[in-house]
Amino acid sequence: MIREAPASSENAKLGDHSADRRMIMLAAMALFVGSGGAVGAWMLLKMIALAINLFWYGRLSSAEADMADSVVGMGVLIIPLAGSLIVGLIARYGSEKIRGHGIPEAIETILFGESRLSLKVAVLKPVSSAISIGSGGPFGAEGPIIMTGGAIGSLFAQCFHLSAAERKTLLVAGAAAGMTAIFGTPLAAILLATEVLLFEWKPRSFVPVVLAVLVAFAWRPWLIGSGPMFAADLHVPAGVWPLVCAIGMGLLLGVEATLLSTALYQIEDSFHRLPLHWMWWPALGSIAVGLGGLIDPRVLGAGYANIHALLGNSLEMRAIATLLAIKAIVWLIALGSGTSGGVLAPLLILGGALGCLVGQYLPGDAGFWAMIGMAGIMSGAMRAPMTGALFAAELTGEFDALPICIAGAVSAYAVSVLLMRRSILTEKIARRGRHIFQEYSVDALDLLQARELMTVDPDTLSGEMTVEAAIAFFHNDANHRSYPLVDGAGRLQGLVSRSDVLRWQVEGVDGATSLVENLSDPSQPSAFPESPGGVVADLIVQSGVGRIPIIEGESRKVVGILTRQDLLKARHKIRTGETERTRHARWRVNPLVTS
């Protein structure tokens, strides 16, 4: 029996995508996951409102309330402390996975946890985040809902017989659906899934994620509301100069993102050096939250009203500068303490504040430049340039500003990747000993077919050769560890190796018998000239055979051999092409010769 690579003109057609019918099944499942993500977002917002009412107004209500309007006096020092103590207890005796941003935990589960999230995390993450935000924590709901929506998708997937890749698709579908329901940004949610969470660009994952997002977007008017979350009537300046200014703004935002990320992890390192159990760290961080709230109550909570004010340019420059400085300090200390919270809303405020300040001196109104600031800071900090640009446009409804948003976002992204080795999200994972490579590229081996890599007309042995002759051949003349066995027409019959020869000598096999008669395992992996190199590599791993014969589809004649070394050489050659620099065009100017 010959085991063949699943790629031949006879039994399979090579395509430019790997999707199959299971994509339809995942798409159908995504409809339920999208609905679950939308409901999870609605429940999270209600829990945050309930916590705000309980902590700041002493009433049992889930109606919208602004903690900045409450009159608690010095209670602003006590309330964040109380909330942080509760979060610390939940993390200690519930699940440690509720600590942190939410998005890094989702990424880690996708890449290293086979996309399995527990029911405990699905319940405790939104509860702890609602308590943290509701008691004054300077966070937004995006990180928690991404974790919560992802947990809904993962739990749903675990009810069925699915692969880790399929569970990942539904986890990301739930996360993107939750983000869509909260912010009403379907395009940005799809791009966030692609740029940050999926770590691939394949139809099998893209189509279900899009369907989950669309379902959540359809639910949003019924559960949360319709229209842009931060609808603004901004004057979008025209011409070349706004694009130039946006690029310059992006450079500043890239530096801001770098400074914020660096400061965050330095603060986190400081907490790790404390002689206290991590359960108490959020309580210590809450002291900074309370003090910040005394200076400027607007730094408390998610601060969505601040984003409205920045886009409307309704704050004085001194107030904007105060918000920028105090919000940054409070957020960095609170998040560095390991409490449950997110990064996106604080980043939007900090980027928007810087944009609004600089925008006082740029063409157009300062509110427009606050929008560019939001796009740039999200791009620089999270390494998601297209997500950042579209997110700002969808949040405000100002799609006319999209080209300028892209200019600012890509500029900030360029500075960030040059100054920071990792993003604010992946740095946390790296500190746990796991490296993440975020650049997507096609597998070098999948770009090449076996015919481009194989050794043509390889050495073979006749299946009718006697065992005695084979032993002599391997002792004296063999150049390889194994050889394909062929019949008189050159058709593949099996593979004989040095280990077979040694076994025959030990067992005392009759030397007059043929090689074909003595093969203990007549099955032999083989591939076709059309087989992608990656498929052949999989055959080598699965079979443990380091030399794969390449056979013609119809005649089954051996036309080549492909080895591990051939595959490694091909991969090295392609990677060298990315770094080796040469110049092929050489211009020579011949001077005119005059007589």
Image: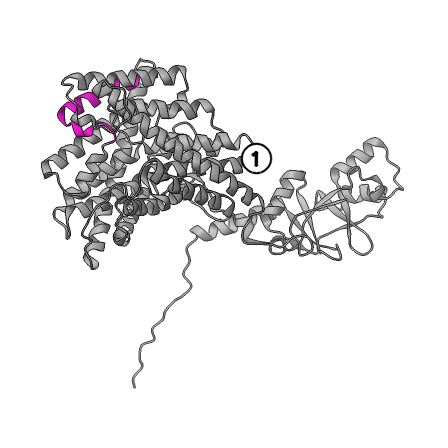
What residue does disc 1 label?
Answer: 162
Above or below, 545 against 50 in this view is below
Asked where in the image residue 559 lies, by quadrant, the reply is bottom right
Q: In this view of the protein, can residue 216 be seen by the observer?
A: yes
Which amino acid type corresponds to the residue marked 1 in the rendered image? Leu
Residue 368 image offset from top left, x and y in percent: 19, 48
| Residue 53 spot, x, y in % from top left | 25, 22
Q: Is residue 319 above or below residue 537?
A: above
Residue 87 in the image, given as x and y percentages of width and height: 33, 19
Q: Which stretch is magenta?
A: 281-302
Q: Residue at x 42, y 38 (%)?
A: 197
Q: Nearer the viewer, residue 263 or 121?
A: 121
Q: Is the C terminus in the top left, top right, bottom left or bottom right quadrant?
A: bottom left
Q: Is residue 220 above or below residue 45?
A: below
Q: Quadrant of the N terminus?
A: top right
| Colour pattern | one colour
Between residue 195 and residue 261, name the one nearer to us. Answer: 195
Secondary structure beneath dot 1 equals: loop
Category of crowding for the residue at label 1, using alpha-carbon neighbours closer than 10 angstroms: few (below 14), some (14–19), many (at least 20): few
Q: Is residue 284 magenta?
A: yes
Which residue corresponds to the image point at 52% horizontal and 45% vertical from the top-left? 204
Please state if 147 lies on the left or on the right of 166 as rendered.
left
